[in-house]
Amino acid sequence: MAAHDLVKESDTGMLGANLSRQFRIVHGYEVGESEQRSWRHSLPALADALVGAGLGSVEMLIEYQVPLSSYRVDALLCGVHPVTCEPSYVAVELKQWTKVRPVPDAEDLVLVDGMDNVARLHPVAQVRRYCDHIADFTKSLHGHEDRIRGVAYLHNATDDDVDLLFALAPDAYGQLFTGSSKAKFQKYLVERLAPAAGVGAADALRSEQVAPGKKLMDVAAEGIAERSQFNLLDEQRVAYSLVIRAVKKARAADFKEVIVVTGGPGSGKSVIALELLGELYRNGLSALHATGSKAFTTTLQQATAPDDPRIKKLFRYFYEFTRVEKNSFDVLLCDEAHRIRDPYIPQRFRDRQRRQVEELLDAARVPVFLLDEHQVVRPGEMGSVEAIKEAAAAMNLPVRHVRLGGQFRCGGSRAYEEWVLRLLGLLPGGPLPWKGDDRFAVQVADTPQELQAVLRSHHEGVRQARMAAGFCWPWSKPVRRANNVVELVDDVSLSEWDWAHPWNVQSERSIGGYPSKNLWATDPAGFSQVGCIYTAQGFEYDWNGVILGPDLVWRNGAWAANPQENKDTAVARASEEEFTHLIRNTYKVLLTRGMRGTVLFSTDRETREMIRTLVTGY
């Protein structure tokens, strides 16, 4: 929409309703009233500045979605550069804030009056990251990164109201303007946008294919390739070589092939993915790693690129490929692919939306799926070999399947993995006595205190230990005490044993010395909290404590699943058959996180005694 058209539509009073309708068509869901209100107040202020500067023909892409992201820029101005006559873009972050101050000792965080004293990202830092990301993944900007600029416009504030925010140094991707510096803002715009129609520049972005730029690929080649040095064995090397072979064929001809890699916990699926990522970038090929887990992706980013935000961009999420053009990448590595979602799509959107597995298959010449079918733990997760093969067959794509036979978690004990599968009825034959394995230890605790004491003895030595539980207790928000100290609530409360501890932190920020939810499994401070399936899945630690709750108990020689005892509402609402399957998978995941040993405790006496008879006899 051109700026002068937006001004006219605003004058009719229909701007919010019309944009809301268009948003629903593009994104497939309704926008809230608060966002409509911000459109009605902020967008006319920006359009007015453009029209007043003689730039009424500049095209405004409202709520422009950042490539491979769920984030959106408030407005992306599209036009022609007044000197070079090349396409020129300005990303604008709009704020209605009036009084803002920086967070002490954190120049990129701010506090906004009237917003509950919650830290927010400095708007310049926010738009700077948007510009950087757009430049890295928009093909027409590769080699022309100077075509995009970024500004934050606080149109309701004055420079004096937010004077401390100017301490964050401006650069090409981020500058700050307020209502009192509107004239400076207009001068800035005139220096970057000509008074000409911007439809052509906007159309170039609408049809744009997404791909990592050469600079990002060079950084990745230096970073990931140097950091991921794993020795791939047997079937791991087979999977690796099949992907490299498929890429070579795809580059030489119009060829596309799907690779599926399956294996149990610790079989090396993620190792294969990281090795491939490094090798592909060393050879100038484009690839991305994707998962459905925030915690797992964050940890991979920390492990491969703790100090390099550009490399972190190579680690994405499954939902970010909804609008990616077909075959945008050479390879898409879908790790933890059992977490691929298959949500219900309303009838009115079915002509436009596809299933997530279809989006992932389309995104690259060689889509690679790495999964463990026994780790589907939520309704809507459909990642299975059969589902992927069916989707690929419908698209006439050949599939190669590699089964990993190795075991690198659980001390490399295949016996323990089979024992867990038989224990939970995920393999036929019923529970087996644990006969022991020199590589892995199994213990049953009589009390939660005993479980914690065993884990602590290892954690305080040279090992790392964690305790996790079934989702059978409520999960409260942290509380703020009278002395302004924020504390977690001891929700996992086992009153029979006078034992209580908090769940891990719910948020992505640390609280009171406790690590964020994404780092619970890897930060040493995570020991004192109880992890859940969503923070434990995908991770490993030396010693693993598992609390089996009342949602799965042993009765009359068989497992009985009790959805009414489960506090995960999405899982508890599943059908009886689906809940039983999901809850067994959940405990299978929790029981296979350890590298050296597992300590089990069940809150149910009969269940505890059954497991004890299996373990103590060896």
Image (spheres, helix red, strand yellow):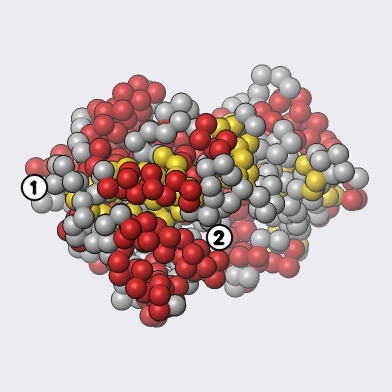
Q: Quadrant of the N terminus?
A: bottom left
**Residue 133 in the image, given as x and y percentages of width and height:** 35, 42
Instruction: Check disc 1 and report its element: helix, strand or loop.
Output: loop
Q: Which amino acid, by three-letter code, is at mark 2? A: Arg
Badge 2: residue crowd in 10 Å (few <14, some 14–19, many ≥20): many
Residue at point 84%, 44% (across, down): 481
Nearer to us in this view, 346 or 494:
346
Residue 512 appears in the figure: yes
**Residue 539 in the image, given as x and y percentages of width and height:** 55, 38
> Circle 1 is placed at which residue position?
253
Residue at point 86%, 39% (across, down): 483
Q: Quadrant of the C terminus?
A: top right
Count of numbered labels shown in the rendering: 2
Q: Is residue 221 left or right of residue 478?
A: left
Q: Is residue 51 left or right of residue 382?
A: left
**Residue 15 in the image, given as x and y percentages of width and height:** 41, 73
Q: Which amino acid, by three-letter code, is at mark 1? A: Ala
Whether tag 2 and tag 1 are in contact, CB under 8 A, the answer is no
Residue at point 89%, 51% (across, down): 495
Quarter of the view holding residue 111? top right
Instruction: Check disc 2 and report its element: helix, strand or loop.
Output: loop
**Residue 525 in the image, given as x and y percentages of width and height:** 69, 31
> Circle 2 is placed at which residue position?
378
Nearer to us in this view, 70 or 315:
70
Nearer to us in this view, 335 or 295:
295
Badge 1: residue crowd in 10 Å (few <14, some 14–19, many ≥20): few
Residue at point 35%, 21% (across, down): 226
Q: Is residue 474 above or below residue 128?
A: below
Residue 371 appears in the figure: no
Looking at marks 2 and 1 on the same chain, the residue that comes earlier in the sequence is marked by 1
Q: Is residue 197 left or right of residue 555?
A: left
